[in-house]
Amino acid sequence: MISDKTVERLSLYRWLLETKVDKDTVSLFSHQIAAMACVSPAQLRRDLMTTGYSGSSTRGYSVKELAGSIAGVLDGNEPAKVALIGMGNLGRAIVSFLRGRRSRLKVVATFDTDSRKTGRVISGCRCYGQNRIEEIVTREQISVAVITVPSDVAQKVTDRLVNAGVTGILNYAPVPLRVPERVYLENRDVTTALEKVAYFARKSTEKE
Amino acid sequence: MISDKTVERLSLYRWLLETKVDKDTVSLFSHQIAAMACVSPAQLRRDLMTTGYSGSSTRGYSVKELAGSIAGVLDGNEPAKVALIGMGNLGRAIVSFLRGRRSRLKVVATFDTDSRKTGRVISGCRCYGQNRIEEIVTREQISVAVITVPSDVAQKVTDRLVNAGVTGILNYAPVPLRVPERVYLENRDVTTALEKVAYFARKSTEKE
DNA sequence: ATAGTGCTGTTACTTTTTTCACAGTACCTG
DNA sequence: CAGGTACTGTGAAAAAAGTAACAGCACTAT
């Protein structure tokens, strides 16, 4: 099993290869990719081990082949279907951000309780009432959910999503969620992140 | 020096103590707080060691005192000043999310290049032109910045912020940023996070 | 050809983070 | 007031993550 952090970096490497490399650059050395990703060359090579792809000692890694190799690890046969629950400011921002991005991830449904939003297409994606979570998630075989609802309903929404078959959750609500072992959960609370940054920012200035 | 992860969890504990505990609950045991935070009791106790605060073996931790003790570690004398650069959808969402939150972090300025936004107050915060970053950051002694600009200008904006004295950066642009040693950087790319979740979601369903 | 170069893949090591386990403690009970 | 209980604080062990180091390779230059 590939680790958390490695998967994250693989995703980054691929993105760099696909978007930040000249079209006429055929191959790159580990230290070049590592520099772009701001990691050590050793770390990069170690991460790439998990993909099974081998570079050449004189030419480095073929940009195209490496990207394909990473894709082979990260991607499934078809794009993962994603639901987003809670079309507040943050929810809308994320949906529109994800639109126009690469299509390995497809936001196929959004949900809200506000009847002014439900039934309409917002940021290019159909918004359903939250009472239809089970129905739509099951029907569309959605496996990934992004939670951007207020924190007091986040656990309830989560339980319903998990029940309906979701196995990965990206949580932006500032509350820890309880999920079964088999469900992968990533928390992205803005406040906590900012407090952490502020703490280290302060420590950094205090030292001088 | 307290670690990354510990600081994050301390921030979470405090939030739980302040918002998720009955006003008439005077004290809690480690396993109770740990359950709320979805961590192990041992982890919680170890984290609390860094604050120097001690609980009682029969009563547990005083809610009020513990929160105060965590604050003593996390907070500086005055609230940290925060700037947010890039008032697109995501930037506005974050600013309005942070407003009405607790005031240990104060978003004192936002920046954008769009002249329809600059000079106005958006989501309760004054928006300046990006050409004034140095001026305002220096004048207001802003130490923390949130970056929500398009990825192609993120590095340039970062360099200017760092130059103007920012020592902590929360980066939402999907690009790795190069910062000097002394500056703390936290990346929060949405796409990468989603790809990671999708990967583990898929692994989870594949196993069955 | 052959020596030299500069890379890769991988193993061994170091550091960081988490978990375990238990001595010590304050209270409660009869 | 002795024995029991359920907790805390923390050293020690384990696990995870990152770094260093180097053998081996493919090519270049002479």
Image (spheres, coloured by chain):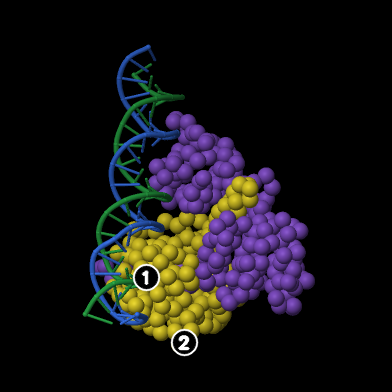
Chain colours: A yellow, B purple, C green, D blue
Residue B44 in view (yes/no): yes
Q: Are marks 1 and 2 on the same chain?
A: no
The residue that disc 2 covers is: A23
Give the percent coordinates (x, y) of residue D12. 32, 37
Q: Residue at x 69, y 61 (%)?
A: B164
**Subunit bearing disc 2:** A
For the N terminus of chain A, give its image quadrant. bottom left
Mark 1 residue type: Tyr
Amino acid type, callout 2: Lys
Q: Position of residue B58 (x, y in %)?
A: 44, 30
Chain of residue at mark 1: B
Res A49 quadrant in image: bottom left
x then y, percent, for residue C15: 41, 49
The disc label shown at residue B199, or none: 1
Total count of labels: 2
Relative to residue A25, is residue B25 depicted above or below?
Answer: above
Taking the image as shown, residue B105 lies to the left or right of residue B27, namely right
Front-lying residue, A56 or B176 = A56
x and y percentages locating residue C6 in the rendered image: 38, 72
* Above/below status of B18 relative to A35: above
